[in-house]
Amino acid sequence: MIQYDPHKWLDHFFDIRGSLVREIFGRVALCVAWSAGVVAFHKHVHDVAMPSLLHTLMGVAMGMLLVFRTSSSYDRFWEGRKLWGGIVNETRNLVRGASAHLAGNPALLARLTRWTAAFPWAAMHSLRGTDGLGPQAHELPAPAAKEALDAQHTALAVAKNMTDCLREARDAGLISDIVLASLDQNIQQLVDYLGGCERIRKTPMPFAYAVHLRRALVLYCFTLPFAMVETFGWTTVVDVLVLAYTFFGIEEIGVEIEGPFGHDDNDLPLEDICETIHKNLYALAGIEKLNRDALPEGL
């Protein structure tokens, strides 16, 4: 995600990165070239002008379609951000509670904290179709970490290891069944939030709507010169440039933000969120980053 100051226009007004100019340049350029050809044909070969009323009415419908498209996409983007905000909160709550109840067993607390810090990284990789446990993977028990990476769903395997830590604490008499259920509720919430993210990722905009909108955009922009050439002449080329840039840009914004878990410039900063969780949890538990070889036996 690109960070910027919304109050400073000139700082980002001419930026290319993240503005989707590269993505729509081909479509817009083709529209402009087509409009120039239409104007030249109209002036030197044959009159091809058509009434503008159709495009006036169609422009209203296009505006409504594009507003719905971007609104739906932003709902998905914001829902994804709220779900990751929930992941931040639940990981903090889990380690905060565990720090109080597992203070008598620092090794077990450290192991739970490390698995909890690995969950967001595993969730991020799962949403991106990759595998990984984050930069602190070497601090996890090697056999369990490999088993989690080889599992059908790495993030769920990490959640199971977190629950195993709580069960081990209950069996050792450090926490009661009630406290176990309370802390495990945080883990259940983490799994639920991940499920919400997977729902967004695996449910794209309905195919019929996306195809119809794009067909309507192409028809509108490529027939627009015929409706404008009689009135505007060569200025039609500039007018088409402005309208095509606006309409194709709005549609591309919807495409860009409807899947907020990837690597695009306008996607959520998942790496930053995961790193923030990592630092917060280590600070809460009062542990330092250690190499696996330096960990106590069984950690």
Image (spheres, grey):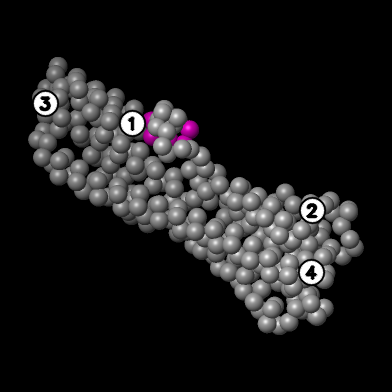
Name above or below for residue 32 compared with residue 96.
above
- Queried whether the magenta region covers residue 23, the answer comes back as yes
- Magenta-highlighted residues: 17-26
Name the residue that disc number 4 marks. Answer: 103
Q: Is residue 202 left or right of residue 102?
A: left
Name the residue that disc number 2 marks. Answer: 288
* Residue at 27% over, 50% down: 65
Indicate which disc, 2 or 1, sits on the residue closer to the N terminus: 1
**Residue 71 x/y as whole percent:** 35, 52
Indicate which disc, 3 or 2, sits on the residue closer to the N terminus: 3
Q: Is residue 125 visible?
A: no
Which numbered disc covers residue 230? 3
Neighbour class for label 4 at 10 Å: few (<14), some, many (≥20)?
few
What amino acid type should be assigned to the residue bearing mark 1? Answer: Val
> Please, what secondary structure does the residue beneath circle 3 have?
helix
Name the residue that disc number 1 marks. Answer: 28
* Residue at 73% over, 56% down: 282
Please state which of the two labelled residues, at mark 2 or mark 4, is closer to the viewer. Answer: 4
**Residue 287 x/y as whole percent:** 78, 57
What amino acid type should be assigned to the residue bearing mark 3? Answer: Glu
Q: Is residue 104 left or right of residue 35?
A: right
Indicate which disc, 1 or 3, sits on the residue closer to the N terminus: 1
Indicate which disc, 2 or 4, sits on the residue closer to the N terminus: 4
Neighbour class for label 1 at 10 Å: few (<14), some, many (≥20)?
many
